[in-house]
Amino acid sequence: MSLVAGAVPRDQTLVFWARGRLITELRATFSGEEQKEPLGGVTLRPAHRARERLKYVIALPHGDYVIHVEAALAPAPNSGRRAIETSVTRRVTLDGTETVIPLPESPR
């Protein structure tokens, strides 16, 4: 996808999902599908407690993007698991609906 001059940014809701773990920190970059350099990025740290899901709203035109995520994940209470760091790169189509990005359960 190439970004068209004048394309109107829209709110795009991304949900980062740790599937049974808790996200303590998450870093994400956003690129157009055919672009080498990111359009932007974000670092998220839950203010009061780690969460299994983090929502983030970004203003981008509808279209195809590549999202690279690095996350620090804590074990859920009483799970017997250890903390890990993980990463994933996903190609997504943003169309104004909620987009869920599952995070891998294995360390990077």
Image (spheres, grey):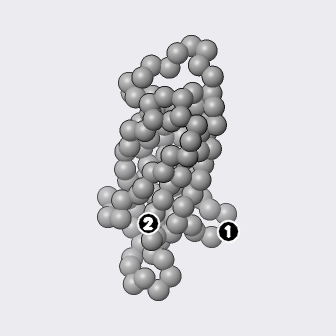
Residue 41: horizontal and vertical position, in percent? Answer: 54, 40
Is 49 located above or below residue 39 in the figure?
Answer: below
Amino acid type indicated by mark 1: His
Residue 87: horizontal and vertical position, in percent? Answer: 38, 53
Question: Badge 1, how many Cα within 10 Å: few under 14, some, many 20+?
Answer: few
Q: Residue at x 53, y 52 (%)?
A: 15
Question: Badge 2, how many Cα within 10 Å: few under 14, some, many 20+?
Answer: some
Of label 2 and label 1, which has the lower sequence position? 2
Q: Is residue 90 visible?
A: yes
Q: Nearer the viewer, residue 27 or 104?
A: 104
Residue 92: horizontal and vertical position, in percent? Answer: 43, 38
Disc tally is 2
Q: Nearer the viewer, residue 77 or 15?
A: 15
Q: Is residue 37 visible?
A: no
Is 79 located above or below residue 70 in the figure?
Answer: below
Circle 1 SS class = loop
Amino acid type indicated by mark 2: Arg
Give me the disc on residue 63: none
Q: CA distance from mark 2 to mark 1?
A: 20 Å
Which image quadrant is residue 65 in? top left
Q: Nearer the viewer, residue 21 or 87?
A: 21
Q: Nearer the viewer, mark 2 or mark 1?
A: 2
Q: Residue at x 52, y 15 (%)?
A: 4
Is 86 located above or below residue 21 in the figure?
Answer: above
Image quadrant in which the C terminus is located: bottom left
Residue 93: horizontal and vertical position, in percent? Answer: 45, 35
Q: Residue at x 62, y 44 (%)?
A: 57
Q: Seen in the image, is 66 located left or right of residue 47? A: left
Query: What residue did someone put label 1 on?
Result: 48
Query: What residue did someone put label 2 on?
Result: 19
